[in-house]
Image (spheres, helix red, strand yellow):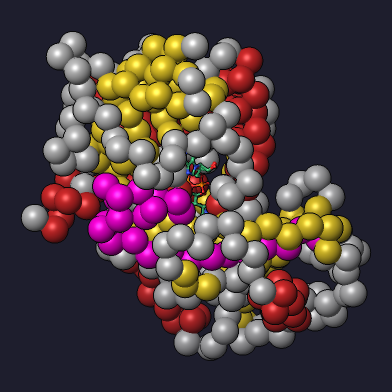
């Protein structure tokens, strides 16, 4: 059996899936390798998209500029796949301390994007929510990441472009032959392509060529709860968030535990799940006894410099990495995928800030 295409994409999480769509728009043929999504962070993620996260209410300037293109790309891909991929999800952000009100005021006065997405701070907390010194309403969006991965997978399967096998971590990366083809042999299938892109999420650091990148990995666990009369229609957040998923379920999460490479797939301790559930009392005035439908866990593949890894590998012609999206995949992913696809299609330069080898040179 053989598969010849322009590009082989290894990993079909958020990064690999976005890249496949962007490459296809350039008219390139793609083969995708992924054994399944059992360990994909994208399947555990809330998919919330906002340029402003955290309690310092900052939005670094590239992130502000990426908001509109990200929203546009998610809607476009959703229309192509025939699903509603992105929807507005207002979130009430409860303050942890009174000083947050001044932070918000200051940011809104100096930053037009933040003034658009954050309301003026208000004191106390809205009815039904846990008591707080103040709160702010945030315009946030939510991307249906599990739906995106599943639909994209079905489309790839249907068009014969998915190989349901993983690239063994220890397999030496291919070098181009005289005609410029990269060749791989996987379980009896010969795969040939002009370019190879490594999008393995939290498994990335286990690949020797990527081991030395400045990774920052954190495991996150989220719970899926059945709706309850005490739950608000909008999202609410503080340390954690309770977000309606629009299908009768709520997403509650997430934990944050720094982990070392290699632990992908480890089951988090029960205490981690319990502490996520206990977090409900910091969000709601009367947290109900609620049934947990499911829990999911994933490793956020972050970068210590906060910049994604989206670059060609040095000394490995034709091989690229697309990873390091951390906890902002929904916002950073679209911009990187479009740029990487254009780079592969016609050699357009990539942002040097996304090149982890360049940064350290
Ligand atoms: C609990 C939690 C909550 C989060 N919430 C948000 C949020 O609200 N908003 C947001 O923007 N981000 C959020 N994130 C972060 C977001 O999930 C990541 O930024 C994003 O999913 C990373 O996508 P990825 O494709 O790089 O990795 P993944 O989604 O992990 O995908 C990697 C894929 O590669 C495949 N793979 C691995 N190794 C191989 C191999 N050797 N061969 C073939 N395939 C392989 C895996 O099967 C997997 O499908 C959250 C993360 C977690 C864990």
Q: In this view, does 162 lie to the left or right of 9?
A: right
Q: Which of 208 and 83 is in front in this view?
A: 208
Residue visible at 80% across and 80% down?
A: 285
Q: Is residue 76 above or below residue 118?
A: above
Residue visible at 21% across and 47% down?
A: 355
Residue visible at 29% across and 35% down?
A: 173
**Residue 278: x and y, percent?**
74, 80
- Residue furthest to the left in view is 361
**Residue 280: x and y, percent?**
74, 75
Quadrant of the rendered image containing residue 159:
top right
Q: Nearer the viewer, residue 236 or 147?
A: 147
Q: Is residue 213 magenta?
A: yes
**Residue 47: x and y, percent?**
58, 50
Residue visible at 27% across and 29% down?
A: 174
Quarter of the picture holding the C terminus: bottom left
Q: Can residue 128 be seen in this view?
A: yes
Magenta residue span: 202-225
Q: In this view, does 356 lie above or below 3?
A: below
**Residue 255: x and y, percent?**
60, 71
Q: Nearer the viewer, residue 51 or 163?
A: 163
């Amino acid at each position: 059996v053989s598969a010849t295409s322009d590009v082989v994409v290894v990993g079909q999480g958020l990064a690999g899936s976005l890249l496949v769509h962007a490459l296809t728009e350039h008219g390139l043929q793609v083969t995708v390798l992924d054994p399944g999504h059992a360990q994909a962070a994208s399947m555990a993620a809330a998919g919330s998209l906002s340029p402003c996260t955290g309690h310092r209410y900052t939005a670094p300037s590239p992130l502000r500029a990426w908001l509109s293109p990200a929203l546009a790309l998610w809607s476009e891909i959703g229309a192509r796949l025939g699903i509603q991929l992105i929807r507005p999800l207002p979130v009430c952000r409860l303050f942890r301390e009174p000083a947050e009100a001044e932070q918000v005021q200051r940011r809104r006065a100096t930053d037009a994007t933040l003034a658009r997405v954050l309301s003026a701070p208000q004191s106390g907390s809205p009815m039904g929510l846990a008591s707080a010194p103040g709160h702010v309403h945030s315009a946030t969006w939510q991307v249906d990441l599990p739906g995106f991965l599943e639909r994209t997978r079905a489309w790839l399967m249907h068009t014969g472009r998915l190989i349901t096998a993983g690239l063994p971590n220890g397999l030496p990366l291919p070098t181009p032959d005289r005609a410029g083809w990269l060749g791989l042999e996987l379980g009896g299938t010969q795969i040939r392509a002009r370019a190879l892109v490594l999008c393995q999420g939290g498994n990335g650091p286990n690949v020797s060529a990527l081991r030395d990148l400045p990774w920052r990995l954190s495991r996150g666990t989220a719970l899926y709860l059945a709706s309850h009369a005490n739950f608000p229609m909008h999202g609410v957040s503080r340390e954690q968030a309770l977000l309606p998923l629009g299908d009768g379920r709520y997403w509650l999460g997430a934990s944050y535990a720094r982990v070392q490479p290699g632990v992908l797939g480890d089951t988090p301790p029960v205490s981690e799940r319990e502490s996520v559930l206990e977090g409900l009392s910091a969000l709601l005035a009367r947290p109900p006894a609620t049934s947990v439908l499911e829990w999911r866990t994933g490793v956020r593949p972050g970068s210590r410099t906060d910049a994604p890894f989206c670059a060609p590998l040095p000394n490995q012609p034709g091989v690229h990495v697309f990873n390091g999206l951390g906890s902002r995949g929904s916002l950073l992913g679209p911009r990187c995928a479009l740029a990487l696809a254009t780079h592969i299609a016609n050699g357009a330069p990539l942002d040097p800030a996304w090149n982890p080898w360049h940064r350290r040179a």
